C-alpha cells in the first residue's frame, strides 16, 4: 500500500472524510428521516417509506463511491518508476539527479513532495495526499465525478426538504421557524456542496481536456504532449480496456510505455516563466536537479577535506 507521509496532505485527506461524514449525517437526520418517516416501514430497522429507502440507498451509494475512490487514490502508487536504468537501445536517456541518477523517461517528472519520479505525472494534489499519475488518474477522476454528483444530489435533497417544510405549513406567515440546529447544519452543508460543485467541476474539465489532448497538466505548462490518436484510445489508456470496470474505484491494470515520447506543442521550447509553474505543480525542474547536484557536491567537499586531514 502506498502512503505519502506529508502532514499537510494527511490533514486535508482527513478533512475530506470528515466533510463527507458530516454531510451524510445532516442529510439523513434533517431531510430523509424528517420527511420520509412512516409508521409502516418495509423494514423495521429503517422507518422510512419506499421513496425514502430509495433516496437513502442512492445517496449512500454515491457517498460510498466518492469515499472509496478517494481512499484508493490516496493509497495507490501513482506511477513510480519500476525500471532504474534505460533500455540499451535508447540513445541519450535522461537521468534524474534527485533519484540517484535513475532513468527518467520523457513523460516522467520528479515530484518534490513524493520525492520520486512519477510516470505521466499530472500534478501533486494535497487533497488526496498523493500525485496524480498514470496508475491512479482513473481513481482521481472518479473521486471528482462522484463528489460532484453527490454534492448536486445533496443540494437537491436540501431543496426538497425545504419544499416539504413549506408545503406542510398551513400559513407561511404563522409558520414556526425551523430548529436552529437543522437550520445551521443544513446551511453549512449547502454552502459546502455549492463550493464543492464549483471547485470540483473545474478539475473535471481539466481532466477531460487532459484526456482529449493526451497531455498531463505538467506537460501543458511545458507545452508538450504524448502521441495523439483519438479520445477513445486516450480514455482507455487511463481507465483500461474493460468497460464494466470504469465506474468502480479499482486501479486499472495498465502497462506503462516508458518509451512514449513527449512531443513539443510548438517549435520553440517552454519559456523561462515555467519555473513558477513547476513550483505550483510540485515538480522539480532541471534547475532544481542541478541545484541539488551542486549542494551534494559542496557537502561532499568538507567531508573529503576532513578525510584528507586525517590521512596527513
Image (spheres, rainbow, N blue to C red):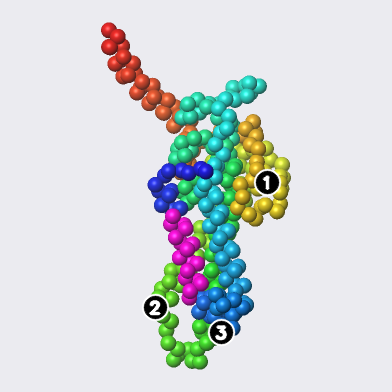
Q: Is the magenta stretch mostly helix, strand or loop?
A: helix
- Identify which residue, 237 or 56, lies in the foreground: 56
Q: What element carries label 2?
A: helix
Residue 145: percent from the left, percent from the top?
Answer: 59, 57
Residue pictured at 58% horizontal, 63% vertical: 62
Q: Earlier in the sequence, mark 2 or mark 1?
A: 2
Marks 2,1: beta carbons within 8 A: no
Q: Is mark 1 on a helix, strand or loop?
A: loop
Residue pictured at 63% horizontal, 24% vertical: 87
Callout 1: 10 Å neighbours few (<14), some, many (20+)?
Answer: some
Residue span colored magenta: 14-30
The residue beneath circle 1 is 240
Callout 3: 10 Å neighbours few (<14), some, many (20+)?
Answer: few
Foreground disc of the pair 1, 3 = 3
The residue beneath circle 3 is 39
- Examine the image and state in which quarter residue 164 appears: bottom right
- Examine the image and state in which quarter residue 150 appears: bottom right
Foreground disc of the pair 2, 3 = 3
Q: How far apart are marks 2 and 3 (CA)?
A: 26 Å
Q: Specify whether residue 17 is painted magenta.
A: yes
Q: Earlier in the sequence, mark 1 or mark 3?
A: 3
* In the image, residue 240 above or below residue 155: above
Callout 2: 10 Å neighbours few (<14), some, many (20+)?
Answer: few
Q: Left of 245 or right of it: where is 121? A: left
Residue pictured at 63% horizontal, 21% vertical: 88
Marks 1,3: beta carbons within 8 A: no
Q: Residue 180 carries which label?
A: 2
Q: Specify whether residue 211 is painted magenta.
A: no
Q: How far apart are marks 1 and 3 (CA)?
A: 48 Å
Q: Is mark 3 on a helix, strand or loop?
A: loop
Amino acid at each position: 500500500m502506498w502512503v505519502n507521509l506529508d502532514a499537510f496532505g494527511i490533514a486535508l485527506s482527513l478533512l475530506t472524510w470528515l466533510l463527507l461524514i458530516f454531510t451524510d449525517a445532516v442529510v439523513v437526520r434533517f431531510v430523509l428521516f424528517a420527511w420520509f418517516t412512516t409508521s409502516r416501514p418495509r423494514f423495521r430497522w429503517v422507518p422510512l417509506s419506499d421513496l425514502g429507502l430509495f433516496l437513502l440507498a442512492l445517496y449512500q451509494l454515491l457517498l460510498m463511491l466518492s469515499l472509496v475512490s478517494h481512499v484508493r487514490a490516496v493509497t495507490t502508487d501513482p506511477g513510480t518508476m519500476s525500471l532504474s536504468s534505460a533500455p540499451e537501445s535508447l540513445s541519450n536517456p535522461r537521468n534524474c539527479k534527485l533519484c540517484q541518477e535513475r532513468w527518467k523517461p520523457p513523460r516522467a517528472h520528479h515530484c518534490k513532495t513524493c520525492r520520486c519520479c512519477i510516470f505521466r505525472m499530472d500534478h501533486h494534489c494535497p487533497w488526496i495526499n498523493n500525485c496524480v499519475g498514470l496508475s491512479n488518474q482513473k481513481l482521481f477522476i472518479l473521486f471528482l465525478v462522484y463528489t460532484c454528483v453527490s454534492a448536486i444530489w445533496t443540494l437537491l435533497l436540501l431543496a426538497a426538504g425545504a419544499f416539504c417544510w413549506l408545503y406542510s405549513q398551513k400559513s407561511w406567515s404563522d409558520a414556526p421557524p425551523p430548529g436552529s440546529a437543522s437550520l445551521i447544519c443544513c446551511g453549512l452543508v449547502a454552502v459546502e456542496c455549492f463550493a464543492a460543485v464549483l471547485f470540483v467541476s473545474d478539475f473535471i474539465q481539466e481532466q477531460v481536456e487532459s484526456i482529449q489532448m493526451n497531455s498531463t497538466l505538467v506537460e501543458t505548462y511545458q507545452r508538450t504532449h504524448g502521441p495523439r490518436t483519438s479520445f477513445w484510445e486516450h480514455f482507455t489508456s487511463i481507465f483500461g480496456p474493460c468497460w464494466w470496470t470504469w465506474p468502480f474505484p479499482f486501479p486499472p491494470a495498465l502497462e506503462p510505455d516508458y518509451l512514449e515520447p513527449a512531443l513539443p506543442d510548438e517549435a520553440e521550447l517552454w519559456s523561462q516563466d515555467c519555473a513558477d509553474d513547476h513550483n505550483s505543480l510540485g515538480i522539480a525542474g532541471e534547475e532544481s536537479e542541478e541545484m541539488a547536484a551542486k549542494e551534494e557536491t559542496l557537502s561532499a567537499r568538507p567531508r573529503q577535506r576532513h578525510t584528507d586531514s586525517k590521512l596527513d
